Structure formats: C-alpha cells, structure tokens
Image (cartoon, rainbow, N blue to C red):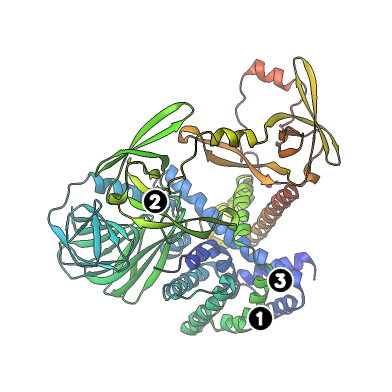
Amino acid sequence: MSDEGLDALLDAYLLGEADAAQAADLEAMLRADSEARRALVERAMLEVHLYRACAVDSQSAAERSLPAAPARRGLKRAWLAGLAVAAAVAVAVGATLLLRRGRRAEGSHEVVSGAVVVAGSPVTRIPAGSSVRVAGTAPAVIRLSDRSQATLEPSSRAVLHGRMAEAREVVELIEGGGRFLVPKGRGRFEVRTSVGRVTVLGTEFSVRLVPEGHDGQGGEPMKTRHVLMAVAVLAGSVQVEVGGRAVVLGVGGSRVFAAEREGPRTRRVSGEITAMNANTLTLTQRGDRGERTQTVAIGAGTKVLIETDEMETVAGEGDERRTRRKLAEATAAELQVGMRVTATVGADGEAVSVVARKPRAPRRRGEGEREREGRTRKRRLSGELTSVNGNALEITRRGDRGADVTSVTLDANSAIQVETDEMVVVRGEGDEEHRRPKIVAGTAADLKAGMRVTVTAGEDGKVLMILIHRPRPRREGGEREREREAGPREPRRRREGGDREPD
Amino acid sequence: MADPDVVRDLLRYRDVLMGFILVLVRDHDLAEDVFQDVAVSILGEAHKGVRPRAFMPWARALARHRVADHFRRHSRRQGREVALETMAEVADQAFAEHGPSAEQSRERVKFLRECLERLAGRARAVIDGRYHDRKSLAEIAASIGWKVASVKVALSKARKALAECVSRKQRAKESMQR
C-alpha cells in the first residue's frame, strides 16, 4: 500500500471511521511493517499535539479578550482537554490576592496531633490567617475553626484563612496535600490551590498538589512548571473549579487536574548573613565593586535547608546526573550570622527558601596568589574563522587598522559549542532577563571557514573553548542604507492573503 | 507523598501516554477520560510506593487495563472492544519501538506551535475549528459553508503540511547538532 493509502487508513482508524475490514487491513500492515508502526505512532502523536498546541493557543486568546471562550462540544470534554490551564493560574493568582487583601477571619484552629510550625515556631493553636508548615515526618491533624478537620501531609504548606465572606472556612494549600473531613453546616468549605478551587458543603475528600521535578526536599519549589492537583472524594460530593469551569465529583470519584505555568517570579540573593532577627536576614555580598547589603524577609512559609557533609546524586539538566551536598531541613532558628546562604525570594519580598552552605575551609595567606600564578593565562578573541586545516585554525579580526590573523590549535580537550536558532531566556546581572541563542555542544566537523567564532585559548595557542556564532542574517545590497533612510520598518503582517502553508 | 520520580515521569510522558490511549480508543475525548483514570491509577500506585523499572511500559500496561475496564463498563462500544483485543498488542509494540522520548514529544509541540503560527487561510480555519473550537466535521462545514467531505480533505492536507513542517524543523535541529 502507498504512503497515501496508509495515511488515509490511519486517519480513518484514529477518527473512529474505519470499518472492520479496514481495521483488519491496518492491523495486518502494522504487524508486518515497522515503518507502518512508526507512522501510526507519529499520526497519533500529531493528533495529541494538535489538541495541546491549540488548547494553549486558546487560553492566550481567552486571556486577551475575556470572556470570548471558544465554542466547545461539551463542558466536560473541553475542560478536560484544557489540562494546560493558564487561565487557572490567573484565577488562582486573583484568588490569592483577594485572600491577602481580605479581612482576617475570626477564630483559631487547634493542632490535634503532629508538628505544625507558624512563623518558625511550633504551635498548638493557630490564629486564623496564619501560614503553616507541617514539620517532621508525621501528618498533622488540625481542627479548624468551623469544626472541620484537616489532615495535612508532612512538609505541606498552607494558609488557614478561617471564615472569609460567604465561605465558612478557606484553606489555601500551597504545597503538599491534605485530607479534609467537613461536617454539614452553614456556608461552604473551600480549598484553594494554584490549580483550582475545591468547594464542598459536607463531605470528606483529599487534595494533593504534586509539582513536577519535586526532588523530595522541596529545595526550589518556585521552579515548578507543572502542578497536578489530585482530588479524591471519600464521602459526599465536591465541586472543583479550574480555569473558570466546574466539575462535580461524587463519592468515590477521583480526578487529576493539571496546570502548566511559569513558576512565580522569584529572585535569588546570595551572601553572608551579617545580621538577623526573627523576621529578617541581612545578607552581604562582597565583590570587586565593594559590598552590597540586602534584607530578606523570612516567614512561616520559608523553607530552611542546610548543607550536610553527605553527598547525593540528582538529575540535572538533560537528564544528566550531578553530585551535590545533601540538604537537611532546618528551622530559621538554626541560621546564624556568618553563614553563607542563598535565598530564593518571592514577589512579596519573603524568602521562599533559604539554603545555608557549608563554610569554606579558611585559606592561608598568599594561597590565592599562588593559585592564580599556577593558572594558565587565557586570551579571548572574536572574529571570522578564515582557515580550518585539521586542528589548525586561523581567526581573522578585521578593524579600522586592517586584518589581524591569529593561529590556534584544537586538541582533545577543546570544547566546541554552537549557537542555535532557538532563543532562551537567561537571568543576568541584577536578575534581569535577557534572550540569547541556545548553545549546544558541537564537534570539530562543525567548524567551517567563514563562520563567526569566539575563541578562548591558552598562552600556548591551544583552544580551550570555541563558540560558533549563528550566521548573521544576510542583507541585500543597499538594504542597510534604505533602512537608515526610511527608519525602522513595520513587521510583516501574518495570516493575510490566503492559504500559506507552514514552511 | 507519591514517589516524585513516578509523578515526574507521568507529567513528562503524558502526551505519549495519551497518544497510546488514543490508538486504543480511537476517540480523543474518550482518550482524555481514560487518561484521567490512568493518571489516578498511576498516582495511586506511586503513593503505595510502587517504583517501576521503566515508566512507559508500566504505564502502557496500566492504560491497557483501564481501557479494557472502560469498554467492559460501556458494552455498547463492543466493536471497539473487539478491536482493542487485537490492536492493543500491536500498538504496544509500535510505541515500544517508535514512541518519542519525553524531550522529543515536548520539542514536537514547540515546533508544531511554530508551524501553526505560519498556517493561514482555509487550512488554519479547519485546524482551528477541529482542534481549537473542537467542532465536528459537520459543524466546521456549516460554519464555513463547505461540504463535509471538503472539510475532511482540507483537514487531512493541513495535518500533513504541519507534520512535514515539524519534521523539517526536527531535521534542521538534528543537522545543527551533528
């Protein structure tokens, strides 16, 4: 059968339109031919990816022009399809702001069992509106002010708001999970998360937030890009709202909801603790330009971790393994003046996490100078690669005074890197974001005369690192002059004029 | 707390798993429902401390069970259940041989979004109608004044163009890495 025939058969099969004879034909082909099986996988993945790509597209469209929600075949389907729920984040953020600005609830909550920490101190009574963290390895059972019971998992973080507006009890689950036993009563009981909101009148249910890449230590929760919210109903029923849409789960029902989102904006501050009190740390960074001091707020939600002597291997970028010192959970009280720390600070100025480093071994006088002397001096130059002859390279720099050619040689230790067309956002000085081309590892075969490169070489002319820059876009003759005369041109408008196929 | 590795793998491979389920149930909306059941099963197993040696084969096996459960509960779809019996094995083999890695899957979505940006006119209209507005072929046909058969052909062509666009971008990236 031709490729077109197979494509048509796969289309019919995956759209549920293939009859029994066609399905049998397809199955026989799939059994016999690996390439047909590849085509099946690719066609199925295209279908899934199209829904995903278009769903995300629809969210940004909805955000631009609310309430222009697209027409859908059914609430449940559309809602489920929208697993990537940018709108949910907007709802959650809005809810959080309202909660923070809303009046504080009256009443307090009582810790029945387990260890609960508020503002760095263990407590047995929790004032309404408090931010709590479950310490230790056992779950914490908390009797809430409306006589509901929350059992929070170890390491969970939540804000127990108490009564708010028409809700008799609002629990804002920030991290971890919990089980809630809610007796019938006046007003609704709400659990709010960054993914969505669970509302009940009288029931027992559990909610668990599971961030992607959670390493079990919660070291950098703000890097989370995906969050799952698992809701299971043990009795009664609950209504779950995600992205402005609602679904009701009955007894025995369980469902997983996901949000794809950028982690909240955070910044990192590193330095030595030069002063501290119960609520703030003063961090001093020392560098060539002198000292810089910053104050970081710490609160109940701040996770404190201290490096231990034990090493561990963790998954890094690109699934590569890397070794690092194991971190142990600690309390703010264990931080001391003189410790070197890195604080991840949220948009509200409060530290989400503080990681205290092991103190460096003290250096003896003159050690630094001796080290520097022992180091190879490096030089760096940028220019055009004008000759590639085996391992011998020539870099030509052109300037007002003419061309300057430098010869360098590659060896087995030379690192070769290549800029790609893909752009990545990186954080630079002052935590500012800027875009630069993504860099991937290359080989000597990538080096071609005419390329723009930046070379870092030792005094002996051996290349330590060579970066191949992306080719600059070609300009037509006189284009630059025309641009100068006419000023910046308007960008081309897309999606005009008929059926342009993607290239 | 569920095993974080299993949860991470579920998130990373969710599209691939969804693709596998789609092959078994042949209906995207139904596949989403079944995927929910599978996700709950996986999280439940992870919570019990189950640590599969290889995530995808384990997840595919769970998915096959959930799909079979679904068809048993909804016996009106007997035709598809019969198809499942015979197709599940070959689909499993296909995904074991050619299923994309999590990274490849994520990259394809990224390329697909770029390709969609450049898709215009009628091709874009039918793709939006189908995958964005989630309309049936008849609804798309009614909204743009075409025959259903024409919509079907246009959709097929648009999908093919997008698939070729994604492949080109993948090849370009691979050649840069070489």
Going from the N terminus, do you reach mark 2 or mark 3 first?
A: 3
Side of A316 where A384 appears, left or right: right
> Marks 2 and 3, Cα distance to the nearest angstrom?
39 Å
Labels 2, 1: one chain: yes
**Nearest the eye: A131 or A75:** A131
Asked if one can make out residue B148 in the rendered structure from this viewpoint, the answer is: no
Which residue corresponds to mark 1?
A20
Number of marks in the rendered image = 3
From the viewer's perspective, is the residue at label 3 or at label 1 nearer? 3
Q: Is residue B176 above or below residue A84?
A: above
Residue B45: which numbered mark, if any? none
Asked if one can make out residue A186 in the rendered structure from this viewpoint, the answer is: yes
Q: Residue at x 81, y 38 (%)?
A: A448
Q: Residue at x 59, y 50 (%)?
A: B113
Q: Is residue B28 above or below residue A61?
A: below
Q: Chain of mark 1?
A: A
Instruction: Residue A281: give x, y in percent of width and height.
Output: 31, 40
From the viewer's perspective, is the residue at label 2 or at label 1 nearer? 2
Which residue corresponds to mark 3?
A37
Q: Chain of mark 2?
A: A
Side of B72 where A5 appears, left or right: right
Report helix, strand or loop for mark 3. Answer: helix
Which residue corresponds to mark 2?
A89
Q: Chain of mark 3?
A: A
Report helix, strand or loop for mark 1. Answer: helix
Residue furthest right as drawn: A389
> Marks 2 and 1, Cα distance to the nearest angstrom?
45 Å
> Marks 3 and 1, Cα distance to the nearest angstrom?
19 Å
